Every structure is written in structure tokens, then in C-alpha cells.
Image (tube, helix red, strand yellow):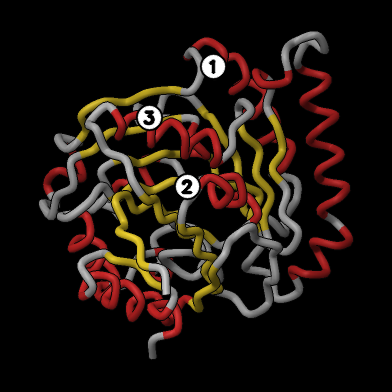
Amino acid sequence: MERRQIDVFLSDYDGTLCPTTSVRGDSGQSKISNELKELLFCISRLIPLCIISSKEFAFLHKRTRFAKILSCVLGIETVFHRSHDDDNKISNFDCIDVQHLIVNRQTLYDNSKVLYNLTKILQSYKDVMIEEKYTSDKEILIGLTIDYRHLDNWQLFKKNKEPSIREMIQRSINANLATNSPSKYRPFIQTYSSHPFLDIYGVECNKGLAFDNVLSQLKQEKRGGNVMYLGDSENDNPAFRKSDIPIGIRSDARLNPILDCKYMLDFNRLPIFLRGLIDNHLMFSDELITIK
């Protein structure tokens, strides 16, 4: 059986390190369990552990203090970060080394006007929750999530109402931006086949670009070797395809996304897997996926 030493550990957050059934905000479900957090801190002391997420920095920072790099809002903002246990650093951000934006601030600022306009329109939809995502300095709106996972019948909402919302969003983007502006500098919509939300980003971005950016920064520290990536949805596929060891996480039995990963693992078995990985000195083998 093939054995591979893990040199870099990358992971999604929502639906991967905490259940996707949790509603946004500060509910207990939106946080990583203490058991899992301890294991992630242990790994982060051995190799670079980085988060690639659609969440904004303010959300991720207080939940992922073990991370070396936080790639926020699908890589629009990347924050180089010293892992820490100190709660004081949550409020004063002493743990931040460098922050980088995927495009210039003016482009993001111009497109944020479109996102603000969409926020006002979307407030008329009473069945959805709107999550606004900002840069770490809170100055620029760079993303929106239209979240309806709290609905008992969200599958029906996805089938019947989400398509019309997507059309409205696209019309608004087209009406508020010059048609000749390059697509990579325009806001775009991220859809999901089975997940109960819809994302709008200030500029073109994906987890493949975020993955490359994170590894580029780590290579400056002469880090290479095998990269493990954990994720749970279609927006993780670009990162799965670049990873040496791609592992899909199942955290909601109602969801069945098509994932480009070699391995699948139930969420409740993730701590067992990580403990086995640590006990094996971060040497991965197929049998760690099936260990009971």
C-alpha cells in the first residue's frame, strides 16, 4: 500500500471542519469542536496548515487560530497569520503578518457598489439570510452569500425560487457594469448543485487560484512535497484537482455533490482520521481512511 508523507495541510472550513447544517453566525454549530481544534493545532505545529474558504477574515480568524494562512472569500483576500492560542490577539490582530488582495483595491471598491445594490434588492426576499463579506479592514464589501439552509423545505426553494434569484442577480450585474469590462474583473455568481446557498463574489475567483496562491507563498519558505486538501462542495473541486491527496468530507446526508476527490470521509470520523495521521507522523496511507 502506498504511503505518502504530508508536507502541507489545506482545508475548507464550512461543511468540512464544522457541519454544513449550521446556520451562519456565532452558534455553537458554526465552530470547530474542541477535540478537532486540538488535533488541528497539533498538525499546525508540525507542518503549514492553511484554510481556503468562502468565509471572510473576521469570521475565520476567531475560529481558525491554528492556521498559518487564511485564504478568505475564495482567495480574494489572503492573510498570512501566526497561529496562536492567545484570545487577546483575536481583537487586536497582532497575529497578522501580511495581507494580499487578488486584484487592486479600486476594482474591488467599484464592484462593491454592485454588491451593495444587490443587498438592498435581496432584502425583499424574506426566506433568505444575506451574509455580507468584507476585507479584513472592513472597508470593502467583496462577497455575498444568499443562505437558506435554515428552511425546512430548502430543497424545494432551491428548485423553484433560486433560479429566478440568479437571473435577477445577473441582470443587476449587467445593468451596473460596462459590458466591455473583462470577465475576470466583474462580479460573478457561484452556484451549487445541492447545497442550500448561493454566492456572489466581487471579482472572478475560485479555490484553484487560492490553492496556487497559498502554495506560492509557502514555496518562498522552501515548502513543497505532498499537499492534502479537505473539502465538501463543488467549489472545492478546483483545489481537489490540484491536490496530491484530495479528501471529500460528508457532513450532511441530504447533500450529494459531485466531488473530484479520490477519498471520502464522514464528518464524524474526521477526528479519528486526523489522530491516526498524527500517530503515523503525518504519513498518509489508504488504510487511515477506513480505520475505526
User: Which of the marked residues, 2 or 3, is nearer the chain's N terminus?
Assistant: 2
Direction front: furthest residue: 1
Q: Amino acid at mark 1?
A: Tyr
Tell me the residue that label 2 is attached to: 53
Tell me if 62 is positioned left or right of 139 in this view: left
Residue 220 drawn at (x, y percent): 27, 27
Q: Are marks 1 and 3 in contact (CB under 8 Å)?
A: no
| Secondary element at image label 2 | loop
* Residue for point 70% across, 76% down: 152
- Cα distance between the residues tagged 2 and 3: 17 Å
The amino acid at mark 3 is Ser
Residue drawn at x 57%, y 64% is 262
Residue linked to disc 3: 216
Q: Which residue is mark 1?
A: 109
Residues under numbered marks 2 and 3 in contact, where contact means CB atoms less than 8 Å apart: no
Q: Is residue 292 left or right of residue 220?
A: right
Query: Which residue sits at x=31%, y=57%?
Result: 6
Q: Is residue 233 above or below residue 215?
A: below
Mark 2 or 1, nearer chain start: 2
